[in-house]
Amino acid sequence: VDRKLARDVAHDARPVAEKYPNSFAVQLALAEAELDLSDFEPQSLARAEAAADRALALKPDSVEAMIYKGRAILERGKSDKSKLAEARSWFAKAFDEDPEHPAPLFYNYLTYFEAGSAIPESALIGLEKAYDIALYDPQIKLVLARQLLAEKKGLLARDILMPYAISPHESEGAKKMRDVVDLIEAKKVDDAYKMLAGEMAEQERKRKAGEA
């Protein structure tokens, strides 16, 4: 989702949410729209969380509403680490409701990654399970590959990255993935980790700046 689309969707969703404050589906849609926009306009985080709260008030057992609530808090936790435990609690609640949903497992892992401290085994296992459930999700794939490289498990990371490395598209991203795989095969796992982590950070920067 680019900045213009995110802004347009959120702009259209707000008056509908005001008109139908007791519609769970409408409030949930607004939470998602505001979260998408918050990538470009951080002030939307408060609106996203408020919409998630309204959705939860209407349907307290909603896994999606719990995830949106947790994601909004997680985003704030990137600059205020004290928020990460609160975000984690919402992902735990979502997991309790639906243990087979990949998102609570994935975002729970990210709360520990963003904390910058040792990641517990349970969160690592959860990330691997999220990957097994959502093999189609490129974000989970890259995050798991980065984690495996951090654990010096180069061959496992290579298996995940190989589809990107052999892509017929001659994009800069595909070239970077080939370079990462080459480093792994040369047994330069630390260098591969640094390159992959740097590429992921750069792609995120470009996306938020509207350059991707």
Image: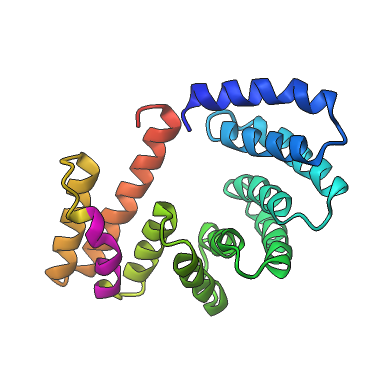
Q: Against 211, is 74 above or below?
A: below
- Nearer to us in this view, 178 or 96: 96
Residue plotted at (45% across, 33% down): 208
Residue 36 sits in which quadrant? top right
Viewer-side residue, 75 vs 61: 61
Please give left or right for residue 2 compared with residue 192 in the image. right
From the top left corner, tell me how far across and down residue 160 is, in percent. 30, 65
Query: Along the horizontal axis of the image, is 144 left or right of 4?
Result: left
Q: Which residue corresponds to the image point at 76% horizontal and 54% vertical from the top-left?
A: 62
Residue 35 drawn in magenta: no
Q: Is residue 156 magenta?
A: yes
| Residue bounds of the magenta highlight | 155-164
Which residue is at the far bottom? 121
Tell me how many marks there are.
0
Q: Residue at x 21, y 47 (%)?
A: 174
In this picture, residue 112 sits left or right of residue 62: left
Residue at 28% of width from left, 57% of height from top? 194
Residue 77: image x %, image y %? Answer: 62, 50
Q: Is residue 178 above or below residue 209?
A: below
Say left or right for 78 vs 150: right
Q: Picture coordinates of residue 119 (x, y %)?
A: 52, 71
Q: Give how far across and how far down residue 91 sits, in percent.
A: 67, 61
Q: Quadrant of the C terminus?
A: top left
